Amino acid sequence: MPLLQEDRLFPTDPVTRAMARELYDLIRDLPIISPHGHTDPRWYAEDAAFPDPAQLIVTPDHYVFRMLASQGVALAELGVPRTDGGPVQTDGRKIWRLFAQHYHLFAGTPSRLWLDHSFQHVFGIERRLNGQSADWYYDHIADCLTRPEFRPRALYERFNIEVIATTEAATDDLRWHRMICDSDWDGRVVTAYRPDGVIDPEFTGFAENVAMLGEQTGCDTATWAGYLDAHRGRRAFFKQFGATSTDHGHATARTEDLPQTDAAALFHKALKGDCTPHEADTFRAHMLTEMARMSLDDGLVMQIHPGSRRNHSDQVMAIFGRDKGFDIPGRTDYVAALRPLLNAVGMRSDLTVVLFTLDETSYSRELAPLAGVYPALRLGPAWWFHDSAEGMRRFREMTTETAGFYNTVGFNDDTRAFCSIPARHDVARRVDCAYLATLVATGRLTEEEAPDLAHELTYGLAKKAYRL
């Protein structure tokens, strides 16, 4: 028996379901535009075989290991590396068995859909994963991974990816992107400029990171003017490797537009480590506006991902470091927080600022009204804790009536889990087709309009918004 139902995520009434299926059949095979994500560029550069099923599917995916951690499974037993180099499980089969024994925990979750899609469509499996089938699964996937058709570049082509963006820190040397560019492979893998480590005074090693930025660019980053010039230089460097966007993962959406003398004074305090928490937040807020102004000059699309209370567990942060599944959504204010930036540049139609949120309560109250009037703003898709079938549906329902479809940017997968990319895009395509079919069935959209909109939501909007 297949792991997946053919009409999954479509409406239950026969007429609307048939309409959704017809729309989906029109767009299901369109190329994937993946404008924001966290896959490792080294995979595409070296095109080496993935080491084992656990290292491919379990260990790198915080969606997977955070669920297991919630039921008392130790991260070390799942092979998650420790920052101090301490011992963790390295036997892929043992990690996989532990994962399989707890697979029932994913029932009803988006992760279950993504994983089952990967098992069925990538590896040709139609047998349920559990403790009894764990070794069979492991051996089957491990055997697949020895074959050339399961190497990163082959999977990229099999997944029908047209372009995929990775995300690198501002000080990254982009060696893997250089290797991709120097190869004879024609896959399109681009980078994105993530400057958090040189913008956030509370980021570990901030002053050292800023000094490295100066060394890389030849700019005097001990001065405010030199620091800004260094950002411009690095952004230009990233553009050489295909970057069309920047990415900003601040805790809040706060922006400021300070006088340059005030901004310079805060910068010097930050370098000395003398900023209060409020001053650090003020500096981050001002730098979002500076980044927006730079985007007017160099054309990079600006992405703002606020609302994550990152690294919530001090214990996990101390042992395993950042981005280990303990990032929790928080309430986010957009209307007041974004006003300084929007007063400075929000009416510019040659600027694109893509807003994401982890706070669903802001969809209809704040985000849709803002994007529905400011030319510079676009709404990113349902993100992270809401990048599920229900989350995507709620996003469309709560934003379309105010912002419409064309002030959104389609879908991006935002993933580290390579094999989940086609699965995530498939979920988004099904949800959007179901929503469009509902609009047609209830007289809010014509049958003639729906196919073009399905194409835009799947392909056109992302390609246009991210200038790809």
Image (cartoon, rainbow, N blue to C red):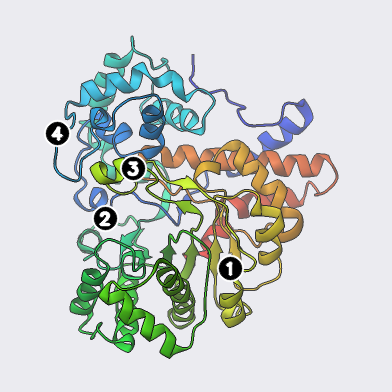
> On residue 19, which mark appears?
none
| Mark before the other along the chain sequence, 2 or 3 | 2
Question: Which label sits in the foreground, 4 or 2?
Answer: 4
Asked if one can make out residue 53 in the rendered structure from this viewpoint, the answer is yes
Camera-nearest residue between 217 and 265: 265
**211 and 350: which one is in front?**
211
Q: Amino acid at mark 3?
A: Lys
Report the residue marked by disc 3: 324
Q: Measured from the top left, where is residue 136 in percent x and y?
A: 29, 14
Q: Which residue is labeled 4 in the image?
A: 87
Q: Amino acid at mark 1?
A: Ala
Label 3 Cα neighbours within 10 Å, binned few <14 / some 14-19 / many ≥20: many
Badge 1: residue crowd in 10 Å (few <14, some 14–19, many ≥20): some
Q: Is residue 70 left or right of residue 81?
A: right
Which disc is residue 185 wearing? 2
Write the residue at 33% across / 41% down.
155
Instruction: Say what secondary structure mark 1 lies in.
Output: loop
Structural distance between the alpha carbons of marks 1 and 4: 44 Å
- The CA distance from mark 3 to mark 1 is 28 Å
**Distance between the alpha carbons at the discs numbered 1 and 2:** 44 Å
| Residue drawn at point x = 52 percent, y = 72 percent | 255
- The image shows residue 88, relative to residue 366, as above or below, that is above
> Is the Cβ of the residue at disc 4 closer than 8 Å to that at disc 3?
no
Binning the other alpha carbons within 10 Å of mark 4 as few (below 14), some (14 to 19) or many (20 upward) gives: few
Spatial CA distance of label 2 from label 3 is 33 Å
Verify CB contact (< 8 Å) between mark 1 and mark 4: no
In front: 317, or 245? 317
Which quarter of the figure has residue 367? bottom right
Circle 4 — which element? Answer: loop
Residue type at tag 2: Trp
Which residue in the structure is indicated by mark 1? 337
